[in-house]
Image: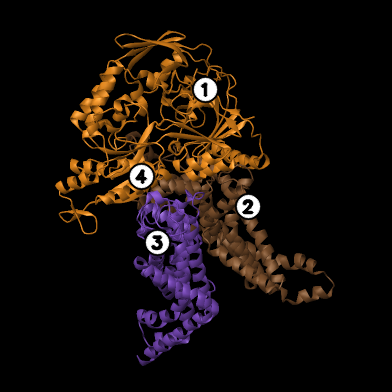
Chain colours: A orange, B purple, C brown
Amino acid sequence: MHYSSKSKLLSGSAIVAGAFLFSAAAMAQDVTVAFSASELGATAYNPVAASKLNTATSLIFDRLVEQDADQSFHPHLATSWEETPDGMAWTFSLLDGVTFHDDTPFNAAAVQFWIASYEGTENEYLVEAIGSVDVIDDLTVRFNMDRPEPNLLYNLASAFMGIPSPTAYAALGDDFGVTAAVGTGPYRLESFEIGLQTVLTRNDDHTWGSDLSENTGPGHIETFTFREIPDQSTAFLELRTGGIELLLGVPTDFLQILQAEQNIEIIQMPGTGISYMPINVTAAPFDDIRVRQATGMAIDQDGIVAAVYNGVGAPARNFLISSLPEANVDPDLNVTYNPTRAGELLDEAGWMMGGDGVRVRDGERLSVDLFTENSTEFTRLTQVVQAQLGEIGMEATITVFDSSTIRDEYRRNAHQLAVRGYDWNNSDILDWFFSGNRLGYPNVSMWEDAEGQRLNDIAMTESATAAERIANFTTYHEYVLSQHLFVPIYQPTQNIAFNSDAITVPDPVRGSRFRGQSFLDIQVAE
Amino acid sequence: MKTSSMTARTLDAFARMSIGRAFASGIGMVAGGFLVLLVLVAIFAPWIAPFDYAAQNLMNANAPPGWPHLLGTDEFGRDVLSRVIFGARTSLSVSATAIAISMAAGMTLGAAAGYFGGFFERAVMTVVDLTWSFPDILIALIFVAIIGPGLTSTTFAIAIAYLAQFTRLTRAQIVRLKRETFIEATINLGAKPSHILLRHLMPNAIAPVIVVGMLAIGDGIVLEATLGFFGLGAQPPTPSWGAMMSSGTAQLFLSPWVIIFPGVAVAVTVIAVNLFGDELIRALDIRDRLRGS
Amino acid sequence: MILRYTAQRLLMLIPVSFSTSVVIFMIVYLLPGDPIDNLLRVGSSPEDRAELVAQYGLDRSLVVQYFVWIGNMFQGEFGQAIVLRRPVADLIAQNLPYSLTLGGLAFLFSSTVGMALGTLSAMVRNPVLDRFVRGFILLGSTVPGFWLALLLILFFSVNLGWFPVSGARGWESLVLPVLTIGFGGVALVARVTRVALLDVQREDFVTLLHAKGLSSGAILFRHLMPHALLPVVTILALRIGWILGGAVTVEFVFGRPGLGSLLIRALGQRDYPVVQACLLMLALAVMLGTLIGDVAQAAMDPRIREKKS
């Protein structure tokens, strides 16, 4: 400990000194990227154990399969796969000649070790259906399932199933992803200053890009520096002034300005998440379902899209993004703006409008706590929500928390309402946020219900085919909506901006997010 | 009894004359006048402000200064001028309350330390010196971190940050005055310590403390703005100059007036406080009594 | 003698450092909730709790706990950051060089530009210049630091594009932050220099030097300026807390790494081991600065200088 800090002190000073000398460093081969606000604060590049990952993870680690925007799955480290008709076994053929950054080979044994390493972590649910892993030969592996899992390929394509080197993982333990991160990806982790920046350098041995990239060999760019810029407007200014070349996640305010700039180009991709307001059902007055329903009707989603987001994106009416089939629920269950009805419901529940615009019942004011995290976008949205709640006679007091500790705050169960968002394009997000096994966080609504849990478990574990899964999740989704556990607000689009004088990006962008496969195709502009 | 009321009346007249002198000078008139105006604006804010400071009008967000929004609108379409006016209320009341608390506590502590001396004095002054050289923003940050954000904690944070100043000043005054012959005489006559403190020492020590208090209000306004900038002060939608500038950072490029106007308000107020304070020091002729604080 | 005074002040540092460390130590206990919870992640396993309790002696009396804590500090064992899950010592080692660079440069900038301005104001008897300098000094000490920073960014980074908006890459990213902190420092130093030079100018030996035929420039630089150095160092050392406070704000606004931004982030995240370690470092810096300032001030005071031991 002593020595490592001393050497860190020296190297820190050296970095600062070096920065002086090499300020105009070879920028041609060094691209600086800024994370989007929702990706800040990752503590480790450890796909197995981490609860939060950022885009750089997809450059360090490869996955068995990749998913394209049209929901299809493409081979990557797995060249082909076969599922038995009863869904109880999957066999994967692995790509030959792949090595980790520490020169150890990628093979079936590595996959076996990797699946086992999820035990005891937060992400264990990803492999929960897998009973055991058999090594058939060096390049063939079989998953023996405890139950059919139609969602297996989706999980395998997620960033949380990047494959680490077994040797390094075992050796580094808790330090894996912090002091070093070893995968098979096109870029190696050079340095990681937590909360500040991550520097990746090209892996020249990488010749196994998936077919989602035009370039399947080593990346064109030599170094990617990922900066964590907490203030969104600072990030925007950095892009405009040339401080960074690529900005993942542009606030809608700035889209118009950036579009007008000659050297800035915008990429818009379909959204993969929603902003919403969970309601704590255990905290009065929200233990009354009528109050919850009224709260939902107070929010003018279309107005918010028009005014707060300049018409970019779409209103959210339920818990899932519109592109998912499970989002097609009974239209009556969708949450829409209806302040008159909201007023009627509150009157029914005994909350009568007071003289100063706040409702009262038995001498008690309708005064609630509204939590949110300290990103510019959420604090703004929360203030608009506060004003809209005021319209129906609900007085909301805002408290802003740091984004890295707000999850702990939810676990303390001191909240009534909160404004937050999630980023996930699969219906199992319903399980993540509403399962009774996850009270506090992620289950911010603090909802525990026997019937809900039953539907949840059926959808998660008893769906034999993809079609069954969709049906089961739609049913669960509809039940969740009927309980008014949250208020859906907004479906953002993914907006990425880059300096077209400095770099070129693939067109069209493949995959559902701008990550690993797209970075391989980034080139310096001529 | 007759003597003390005569002293009181003489002091009274003297103070009135000197404060009047402070207003007489050119700078004093402008600065002092501005401050009086500011206090009036803060008091009569609901009647002066053209719009409701919390009224959102999202379709008219980020409008540049013009008509009817003389200073433009912020990202929620709220009128900047109205928010600056109500912000004056927040900033002034928080700062004044904080400094009042700080003064009261600091004077008590400092007077006791100065009068009783000995170990008690050494102990108090050690702790006080500790906080005195520590940056006020850090003291305030720590305090707010303990209690949580909001106007109450901001007030107490500011009070604690400046406590040292008043303690030191009062103690210095008391120590100086203790040596005066008329005090010795009073002690010899058998007066109780509380009597001596209240009737004789404090009235003489007050003048410099009040002036420093005024200057501290200026510092307090800056500190409140800084805390608001960090998001630790008044919670939305209550306007505070600092919080306005904080949310304004997001609009630095789109609508810089949201940052410029509250900032100008803070700067002009603090400059006026400092200028008037200087004039007051000159008029009351207590510059030497402020040395060593 | 100065040495004796220094020794005296060093001795006084002991009770001061002790009380400071006690206060910092007590922060965790003043907070609402169980102090052990304040040092752990929410939802930590009982094993983690037991480990922490053992390491810090949290089941023993407060006094024992304090000595365990301070003992750990002396050995460089600052504990584990809750949120970032890293040894606090690593985080400090990572951030300290940035703060030191910023502080050092701000100090240099304040002294040089401040002394230049103060000298100009003292030597050149121009009432307009005088007014300008006095006005500048007033502005420097009253304008809120973060506002100045925002204005500088708006003007020099966004409109003119001369300097980067944020970050810590290269010397260009240091210019605006140093300017922001230095602005107030310059005002301070200018005022002190001006007073010192005006005082010295009246001395007899200056007339003597003039009579001897020395040029004004030579007189200024070789004989007068050195008289201003000590007061400048003194005032900057005494007001080190002010520079530190400025650095904290500036690091936040410009998004630079450093002890200040680490502290603010840790406060927001309720990461108390980090908060305690940062506060200790800052308190140390403040005490050191005050000590240097006090000694320098005493050195200037003829009463102490001329005392025979």
Q: Which mark is residue A372?
A: 4
| Lower sequence index among marks 1 and 4 | 1
Res C60 seen here? no
Query: In the image, which is nearer the foreground, mark 2 or mark 3?
Result: 3
Q: Residues within 10 Å of mark 4 (few under 14, many from 20)?
A: many
Q: Residue at x 52, y 21 (%)?
A: A213
Res B246 seen here? yes
At mark 1, the secondary structure is loop
Where C59 falls versus A110 (above or below)? below
Picture coordinates of residue A261 (x, y %)? 56, 40
Q: Residue at x 22, y 28 (%)?
A: A453
Say which chain tag 2 marks: C
Q: Which mark is residue C105?
A: 2
Picture coordinates of residue A160 (x, y %)? 41, 26
Residue annotated with mark 3: B82
Q: Do marks 2 and 3 both belong to one polypeptide chain?
A: no
Residue annotated with mark 1: A185
Q: Do marks 1 and 2 both belong to one polypeptide chain?
A: no
Q: Residues within 10 Å of mark 2 (few under 14, many from 20)?
A: some
The residue closer to the viewer here, C140 or B69, is B69
Distance of label 2 from label 3 (alpha carbons)? 41 Å
Q: Quadrant of the N terminus of chain B?
A: bottom left
Is disc 2 in contact with disc 3, using a CB cutoff of under 8 Å? no
Say which chain tag 4 marks: A
Q: Residues within 10 Å of mark 3 (few under 14, many from 20)?
A: many
